Image (tube, grey):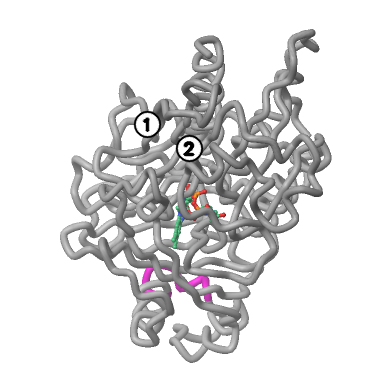
């Protein structure tokens, strides 16, 4: 694994930190913390990597790729994505133990609104503009560059196993109110007492509950809302490039994300406040139609050698479909410290919030973990 910077051992007592939530945000943050000798880290979560897929755990459903959000490079969010790209680029280097989680691919993005051809992408490796005559019909502009795709189930397990290997502890629990954890630590949950001192009330809690932040007592952030995304998984090892077409005026977003495993995520949809937890069959068909139009290469090469492929040529290669709820938030990601009353003589306890990553949780995960760690360090100097 690429080394995470580690501080020297400190003589002060270790601080006990609970990370709430084991999606990509909680796992990355928890792993980042284990590189610091001064912290004991406990991951507390209702759903863990490797569990059956659930609408309450978005990370399992993501594509995913790193393609910068259409934001100005001066924004805080862009910085989160920039730091994450640098980190993932290193993780995906041939020869690292994370290599299997990633695929480096040539990526093409077509825009129907020329203003959408945003500057962040210019910093990507091998960036080029597509000549006008080579654009797909209706597109006003397009760019190509190299990026990484992430095989999300494998990557989540990679983060999880490294967290455990570095001494992190885990407990499965569903938390109703954040004060349950602040007052009782992990001891109050089934199996918690087996964790010994790791189950004590924490010195700080890092809240990485994604869409759960809308419902978690003591947080109940009603500015968090779902942006539902539906996808289809096609086994097509011959596809080794990514492609996206933005048609934002219609709400349609079609993308092709190949994973190293040979599966290709074909998407998608982006519908705010749609909570429906299962794939809709008519949407699956629509996604496949749009996917084939954008990427005829989804069909096997032997078919394309003979004729123009149709939907029937792809259907035998469909291996799954699914949908997830991107944890969007009005105002963007919440990365800030809140202080809450500790019970008894404990004084105030910091809660570091790290949620609301919408459609970019993977590509902003390492940047967000860095900021969460900075906030934690700053808060712990005040207790
Ligand atoms: C179709 C689709 C495609 C996407 N593509 C991309 C992409 O290409 N690139 C990208 O960067 N992002 C992509 N995303 C977005 C990305 O998946 C999310 O931003 C990310 O998964 C959010 O992670 P999270 O850790 O915040 O939330 P989650 O993964 O939902 O994790 C939340 C965790 O908190 C736990 N939890 C919640 N409430 C409680 C509670 N009360 N008690 C205990 N535990 C609790 C849950 O069990 C879970 O473990 C995509 C999303 C979808 C749906």
**Looking at the image, which residue is at 71% across and 53% down?**
157
Q: Which residue in the protein does label 2 denote?
A: 364
Secondary element type, mark 2: loop
Q: Residues within 10 Å of mark 2 (few under 14, many from 20)?
A: many
Q: Residue at x 28, y 29 (%)?
A: 72
Label 2 – label 1 distance at C-alpha: 8 Å
Residue 243 position within the rendered picture, expressed as x and y whole percent measured from the top left? 44, 57
State the residue lying farthest toward the front.
344
Quarter of the view holding residue 37: top right
Query: Mark 1 falls on what kind of element?
Result: helix
Q: Which residue is mark 1?
A: 77
Counting from the top left corner in percent of width and height, residue 105 is at: 58, 49
Query: Residue drawn at (72%, 48%), measured in percent from left and top?
Result: 170
- List x then y, in percent, for residue 136: 30, 60
Q: Looking at the image, do the residues carrying marks 2 and 1 touch, with CB atoms under 8 Å apart?
A: yes
Asked whether, in this view, residue 7 is left or right of residue 258, the answer is right
Query: Which residues make up the magenta segment?
Result: 292-298
């Amino acid at each position: 694994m690429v080394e995470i910077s580690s501080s020297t051992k400190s003589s002060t007592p270790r601080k006990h930190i609970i990370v709430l939530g084991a999606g990509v945000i909680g796992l990355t943050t928890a792993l980042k913390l284990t590189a610091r000798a001064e912290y004991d880290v406990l991951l507390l979560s209702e759903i863990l990597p490797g569990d059956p897929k659930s609408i309450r755990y978005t990370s399992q459903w993501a594509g995913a790729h790193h393609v910068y959000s259409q934001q100005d490079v001066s924004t805080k969010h862009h910085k989160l994505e920039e730091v994450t790209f640098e980190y993932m680029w290193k993780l995906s280097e041939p020869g690292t133990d994370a290599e299997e989680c990633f695929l480096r691919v040539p990526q093409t993005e077509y825009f129907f609104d020329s203003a959408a051809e945003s500057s962040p992408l210019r910093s990507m490796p091998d960036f080029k503009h597509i000549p006008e005559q080579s654009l797909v019909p209706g597109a006003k502009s397009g760019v190509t560059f190299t990026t990484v795709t992430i095989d999300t189930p494998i990557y989540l397990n990679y983060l999880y196993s490294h967290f455990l290997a570095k001494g992190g502890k885990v407990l499965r629990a569903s938390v109703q109110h954040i004060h349950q954890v602040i007052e009782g630590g992990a001891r109050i949950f089934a199996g918690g007492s087996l964790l010994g001192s790791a189950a004590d009330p924490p010195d700080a809690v890092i809240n990485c509950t994604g869409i759960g932040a809308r419902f978690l007592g003591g947080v109940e952030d009603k500015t968090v809302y779902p942006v539902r995304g539906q996808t289809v998984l096609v086994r097509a090892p011959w596809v080794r490039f990514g492609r996206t077409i933005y048609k934002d005026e219609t709400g349609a977003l079609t993308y092709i994300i190949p994973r190293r495993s040979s599966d290709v995520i074909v998407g998608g949809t982006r519908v705010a406040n749609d909570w429906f937890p299962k794939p809709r069959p008519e949407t699956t068909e629509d996604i496949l139609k749009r996917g084939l139009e954008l990427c005829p290469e989804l069909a096997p090469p032997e078919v394309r050698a003979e004729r123009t492929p149709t939907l029937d040529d792809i259907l035998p290669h469909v291996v799954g479909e699914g949908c997830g709820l991107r944890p969007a938030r009005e105002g963007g990601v919440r990365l800030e410290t809140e202080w809450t009353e500790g019970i008894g003589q404990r004084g105030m306890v910091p809660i570091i919030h790290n949620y609301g990553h919408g459609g970019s949780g993977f590509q902003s995960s390492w940047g967000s973990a860095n900021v969460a760690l900075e906030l934690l360090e700053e808060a712990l100097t005040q207790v």
